[in-house]
């Protein structure tokens, strides 16, 4: 039942993302596509084969920042950058990693576990609104780990934070991108270092 609710939640988000994208094509919103690089974590691999499912709610994620008058000001797309991040981090954490197009495909592969991350919340703080000399980004994630049969092993929340000084970059778009990359690198570090210590994950690993 938990699995069904999780998948339905992802499908609802996907519809909302697609509707938003269509709407923005008719607006004068500033589009920011997050781009950057991510270091490979220096950690010991777990002897696991893991399938990764990137829900469209993650791969097509976009956040809209509104102006004080209520109009769309910035459309921040970070889906591809998240795929690049996990493509760097996960192979450093596990012996085998395969990306799948669906949970059903993962179940057929007979892997040890299925990993399916989701973005729950995205917040942006602009100097023009906060009166502070930094751009700040907070991202809240729902990390979902399932067995090869699709049953939940663990479902936990991680948050990441990034900021950049306003005077260090020439444009708002560049500053937003820089703050987002710092936040994603924060996620990479906290996720890779804390994974084995998540209580439900730790209990599951002890059964293997």
Image (cartoon, helix red, strand yellow):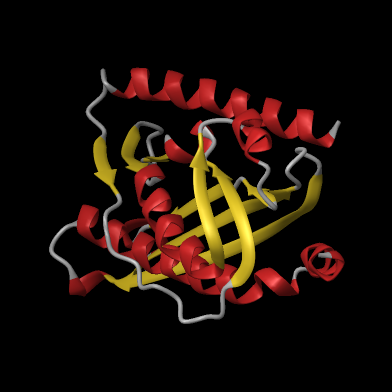
- Residue 176 visible in the displayed image: yes
Question: Would you place residue 124 above or below residue 28 in this image?
Answer: below
Q: Nearer the viewer, residue 112 or 128?
A: 112
- Residue 61 visible in the displayed image: no
Residue positioned 56% across, 65% down in the render: 94
| Outermost left residue | 170
Q: Nearer the viewer, residue 74 or 197?
A: 197
Q: Nearer the viewer, residue 36 or 30?
A: 36
Can you give x and y, in whole percent of width and height, for residue 77 in the image?
35, 42
Residue positioned 53% across, 26% down in the render: 14
- Displayed quadrant of residue 53: top right
Can you give x and y, in whole percent of width and height, for residue 159 in the image?
59, 63
Residue positioned 55% across, 65% down in the render: 95
Can you give x and y, in whole percent of width and height, for residue 82 in the image?
42, 51
Q: How many marks?
A: 0
Question: Would you place residue 183 above or below residue 152 in this image?
Answer: below
């Amino acid at each position: 039942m938990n699995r069904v609710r999780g998948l339905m939640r992802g499908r609802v988000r996907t519809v909302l993302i697609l509707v938003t994208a269509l709407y923005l094509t008719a607006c004068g919103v500033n589009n920011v596509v997050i781009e950057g690089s991510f270091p490979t974590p220096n950690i010991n691999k777990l002897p696991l084969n893991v399938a990764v499912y990137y829900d469209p709610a993650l791969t097509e994620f976009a956040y809209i920042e509104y102006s004080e008058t209520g109009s769309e000001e910035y459309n921040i797309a970070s889906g591809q950058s998240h795929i690049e991040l996990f493509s760097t981090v996960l192979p450093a954490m596990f012996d085998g990693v395969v990306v799948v197009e669906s949970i059903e495909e993962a179940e057929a592969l007979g892997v040890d576990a299925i990993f399916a991350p989701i973005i729950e919340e995205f917040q942006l703080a602009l100097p023009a609104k906060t009166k502070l000399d930094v751009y700040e980004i907070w991202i809240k994630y729902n990390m979902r780990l399932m067995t090869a049969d699709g049953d939940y092993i663990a479902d936990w929340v991680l948050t990441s934070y990034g900021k950049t000084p306003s005077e260090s970059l020439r444009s708002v778009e560049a500053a937003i991108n820089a703050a987002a990359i710092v936040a994603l690198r924060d996620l990479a570090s906290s996720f890779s270092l804390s994974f084995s210590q998540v209580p439900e994950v730790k209990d599951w690993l002890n059964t293997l």
